Amino acid sequence: MVRRIINLLHKEWGSLHEAALLLGSMALVAQLLGFVRDRLLASHFGASAQLDIYYSAFRVPDFLYDTLGSAVAITVLIPFIAEYAKKGNGELRRFMSAMFTAFISAFFVICALAFIFMPKIVPWLVPGFSPVEQAMNIQVARILLLSPIFQGMSNLYGALTQSLQRFFVYAISPAIYNLGIIFGIIFLYPYFGIYGIAWGVVFGALLQDLIMLPVLIRERLVPSVFFGHLKDVRRVLLTSVPRTIALTSSHLATIAIIGIASHVEGGVAVFTFGMTLQSITFTIIGSSYSVAAFPTFAKFWADQEYHHFRTHLLSAARHIIFWSLPITALFVVLRAQIVRVILGTGRFDWSATRLVAAALALFVISVVAQSLVSLFTRAFYAAGNSKVPLSINAFSGGLIIALAYGLTWVFGHSLTFRYFIETILRVDGIYGTSVLMLPLAYSLGMIFNVSMLLIALHKIVDRVWIGMRRAFIQSFSIAVIMGFVAYHMLQFSVSYFDQKTLLGIFGQGLVSGGLAIIVGVFFFSILDNEEYKETKTALHRKFWKQKPIAVETETVIQ
C-alpha cells in the first residue's frame, strides 16, 4: 500500500484528458473538504460581522500573493523551465534557486512593510466596519501575511512538478490547504478565537509546500539560496509584468466589491460564500483543463506546431463547455438545496440561505466564461502574447467595479428594478439584498471578458468559435432540458422528503439532480456527442495500472 502511494506521487500523466480528470478529481476532494470548512464556519458564525472580518482580512495577503507572487506563477515559469530543462537538471536547479531567492527576499520585505502599515490600510478597505471590527481585521490580516510566502513557494514547487508531469502532488495540495484550515477551526478556534483560524490558514499553506518536497528531492530539484542568474530573474520579472498588472486590476475589483459589501452586516460573508460555492465548477473543470493543457500549449507553440496548438485548445474548450453548462443549470435550479446542505447549520439561518443561494445563482451564470477566460489567457501566454489578456482583463476589472457601484445605486433608487431582482431570485423581504448586485456585476464583467478574449484569439488561432459552436449548442440545449427536469422533479418530490431535516433536503436535491443527470447522459448519447465519447473513454482507462500513453496531440511537456 505504501509503495502504491509512493508510485502515485511520482507517476507521470501524459494525456490531456487523463491529467484533467486527475486534477478535477483532486479538486473535487479539495472542494469536499472546502464544504466541511465552510460548514464549520457557517455553524460558528452564520452570515455575521465576525465572519465578514475573517474573509475581508484576506484582501491584503491575497493582493500581495496575486501581484508580487505572479513572478513565480506557474503560467510564467513553465516556459522557462522547459527552456532550462534542455540544459540539464543542474542548470534548471540553479535557475529555480535564483527565482526562489529573489522571491523570498522580496516577499519578506514587502510583507514586513504591510505588517507595519496595516492600521493605515484597513480603514480604506472596509469603510463600513466599526473601529472595533477594523482592529480585529488588522490583527487577523497580520497573521495571514505569512500565507502568501508559503503559497508563493508552492507555486515554485508546483511549476516544477507540473513540468515533470507529476500532477498528483500538485493536484492534492489544495486539499491539504483546506485540511490546515479545518484543523484551525476545530482545534485552534476554541482557544484563540478567530485568530486560531487564521493560524490554521498559515498551517495549510505550509503543508502545500511540504507535500511536493518528496518529488523534488527525488529529482534533485529542490531550490536553495542562490544569488546568480540575475539576468534570468530579470527576464522572468519582465515576462510577469503584464500578468501582474492584470491580476492587480482583478484584485482591485474584488477589493472594491468587498468595500461595498462591508456596509451591509454579513454582506462580505454572503458574497464570499456565493463565490466559493460557484467556484466548485470552475475549479474542478475550468481550472483542471487549463492547468493540464498549458504545458502542451507552450510546447506546441515553441515547436511551431500551430495546427496541434489549435487542436489542443479546441479540445480543452469543448470539454469545458461540455461539463460546465449542464452543471451550471443544475446549480441554478438546486441552489437552495446546495446552500442548505453545505452551510445550513448552527447560526446559518434561512434568510442567510436564501441570500447566499441568490448570490450563487448570479455567480454561476458566468462559470463557463470564467473557465474559458482561464484557458484562453493561458493560450495567449503560451504564444508569448501577454499584452492582449493584460488589456482585456484590466478593462474587465474596471468594468466590474463600475458595474458594482452602478448596479448598487440603481438597486437603491429604482423600486421597479429592486422588485424585479428580489422577486426573480425569491429574496423579497430579506435584509441586505443590495449585496446581490455584486455577484451580478462580477458575472457581467466575466462574460464581457471572455467575449473580448475570443475575438482577440481569432488573430492567432483561426476559426476558434467555429470549432466550439457545435459543443456549445449541444451542451446548452441539454443543460436547459436538465434544468427543466430538475425543477419539476423538485416540485414533484417535495411531499416525499422532510424539508426540515438535512437528510430530507439532501435526498430531494440528490433525486432531482440525479434524474436530470441521467436524462442529460441519455441525450448526449443519442446525439453521439464527441465530448461525451472522449470523456467516457478517458474514464474507462485504468489510472492505477495502465502506463501513460503519449498521444501526439495531447502530450504534456516534460
Image: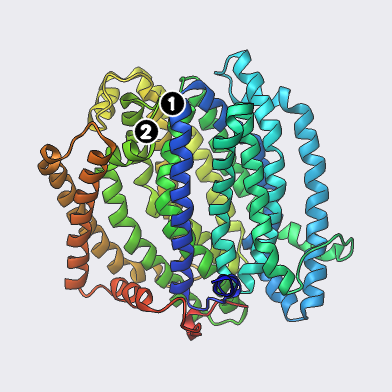
- In which quadrant of the rendered image does the C terminus lie? bottom right
Q: Which residue is mark 2?
A: 356
Q: Which mark is residue 221?
A: none
- Residue name at image x 76 percent, y 31 percent: 115
Q: Quadrant of the N terminus?
A: bottom right
Q: Secondary structure at mark 2?
A: helix
Is 37 left or right of 302, judged from the image as shown? left
Q: Are marks 2 and 1 in contact (CB under 8 Å)?
A: yes
**Earlier along the polypeptide chain: callout 2 or callout 1?**
1
Residue 30 in the image: state x and y as whole percent: 49, 53
| Mark 2–mark 1 distance (CA, rounded to whole Å) | 9 Å
Question: Going by the image, does 406 lie left or right of 76?
Answer: left
In this view of the protein, can residue 85 be seen by the observer?
yes
Q: Which residue is mark 1?
A: 47
Question: Residue 137, image x and y in percent?
Answer: 63, 25
Name the spot of residue 509 as percent of width and height, x first: 24, 45
Q: Residue furthest front?
A: 1
Tell me what residue is drawn at x 18 percent, y 35 percent. 498
Asked if residue 441 can be seen in this view, the reply is: no
Q: Secondary structure at mark 1?
A: loop
At 51% from the left and 27% from the top, the residue drawn is: 51
Who is closer to the viewer here, 365 or 210?
A: 210
Q: Nearer the viewer, residue 195 or 369?
A: 195
- Quadrant hosting residue 8: bottom right
Please name the amino acid that badge 2 sits on: Val
Q: Position of residue 276 (x, y in %)?
A: 45, 42
Q: Quadrant of residue 256?
A: top right
Neighbourhood count class around disc 2 (C-alpha, 10 Å): few under 14, some 14–19, many 20 upward: many
Q: Amino acid at mark 1?
A: Ala
Instruction: Decide: is 444 above or below 456.
Output: above
